[in-house]
Amino acid sequence: MRACVLSRTSPRDDRGPGSRAKFIFLHRAVNTPTKSTGAGAGRAMDLSAFEAVACEIARYARAGTIIVEKSTVPCRTAQLIQDIMAVYRPDVRFEILSNPEFLAAGTAVHDLLYPDRILIGCSQTPSGHCAASALADLYAAWVPRARIITTNIWSSELSKLVANALLAQRISSINSISALCEATGAEIDEVAASIGSDARIGDKFLRAGIGFRGSCFKKDVLGLVYLADSLGLREVSEYWQQVVAMNKYQRDRFSQRVVRCLNNTLVGKKATLLGFAFKANTSDVRESPTRDIIQTLLDEKPREIAIFDPCCNPSVVKREIETMFQPRLDTGGEEKFPVVVYSDIYEACAGSNAVVITIECDEFRNTRPPVPSFPSGHRSNDHVGPRPFAQRNPSEMEILSFQKFLLQSSPGSACEGDPLRRYEEEPACAEDCSECEMVKANGGGARQMVDWHKISYHMKKPKWLFDGRGIIDPEEMSKLDIRVESIGRRGRG
């Protein structure tokens, strides 16, 4: 999918995609990665795919269509779209809106249904405000009007970059304090709880770890760096560049700590990495911090680096590893490549000198997982229920809200199913489907808590565990004769 069309009549006709659409959304599926070559390489966003889609839309969009950019783009990209439309359709005026997405991997549907805000940027003209109002009406079907914010189009484009940059900055800030904690004997969790209780600061994104990850934060911060640089704002550029530098420092520091604790050598030793995706409960491996850790450990000539991730297909991980380290594979000669991907955690940890946790999966914990928390304001009144409805005939969103209320009130009740009668039966998978094989290997999809007694029994002494996400209780692990090194806590390394 490259762009989404939305129409109140017919979504398309014989003239081409979007020819009868009222809205055309340039979605996140239109990739805007960081450029690897050319001007701005390593910082600027590559808009080649975005530009190609805009050209396609310009060819087919009917007059009056509202074009909505949802991809994360540099500030003033709307002008690029306007210029492209003017080249292909000089006699037609199209309104361009900025409507950035604020969806997180693993909670995207919840974030869409219960957003903190909907941001709509438009040109400051009567037609621009009219287009923004039409899009706001679309969202108002399920989002309270108070959460729909309208700005000028440049403010909206910049707000998306700044939102991700500030979250990344917050992570780098608490990670810098974790280094101070390790040097002084302070506990990072206690420090974070203390400062998080200040209402001016809040407790979100104050969990120290091995840095921010995924395809968004680093790309968007670097995009902000390039924007500031191109505008001659050198001090601003250097400030945000340091956020990325601190992120790399945190990963390198953690990797070096692993090596130091293992007597500065991994020769003849096995290390197991628990986690390959960029975060828990997703199979997305883009910008995974595990990649950097593997690189550092490989330089120490280990006997084996084992990898296990409960959400990643082992065959996909193997392909990623081969792509990442192809030069090493090509020059390795007869020497066996030491990175091995496992589908069973106990096999992965058997005979290991060290276990390294890189994602915050609850099943990796050695204590009961905390009760999940959800964004404030979205679930606080769920126990009350959505009734009474505003109208005699409830809307589709009210029906879904009522079903959700019933499910939460009595899980497993008969109200489960398809209240809007729209589900379609999922096609059967091929007999050799690798995803189905992974589900079977994980016990039919049920993910059980790890038995650390079993893992400890089969590890080699001295037994090391490096907690990169702060999910392990060191005192409980010490009962199993496992030495724990955690981010933000003074240890042996």
Image (spheres, rainbow, N blue to C red):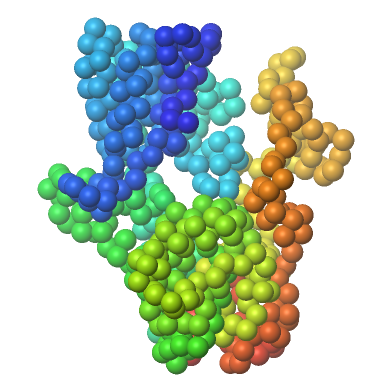
| Residue at figure coordinates x 50%, y 65% from the top left | 207
| Residue at figure coordinates x 52%, y 25% from the top left | 139
| Residue at figure coordinates x 26%, y 12% from the top left | 89
Compared to residue 373, the image places residue 173 above or below, namely: below
User: Based on the displayed image, in which of its 4 quarters is residue 247 positioned?
Assistant: bottom left
User: Based on the displayed image, in which of its 4 quarters is residue 471 positioned?
Assistant: bottom right
46 sits to left or right of 354: left
Residue 152: percent from left, percent from top = 31, 28
Compared to residue 23, the image places residue 248 above or below, namely: below
Q: Residue furthest front?
A: 334
| Residue at figure coordinates x 71%, y 86% from the top left | 457
**Is residue 153 in view from this perspective?**
no
Q: Residue furthest right?
A: 414
Residue 361: percent from left, percent from top = 61, 63
Quadrant containing the C terminus is bottom left
Q: Residue furthest left?
A: 232
**Is residue 2 in view from this perspective?**
yes
Residue 431: percent from left, percent from top = 72, 45
Of residues 2 and 242, the one nearer the viewer is 2
Compared to residue 14, the image places residue 259 above or below, namely: below
Residue 342: percent from left, percent from top = 61, 67
Of residues 141 and 478, the one nearer the viewer is 478
Of residues 63 and 283, the one nearer the viewer is 283
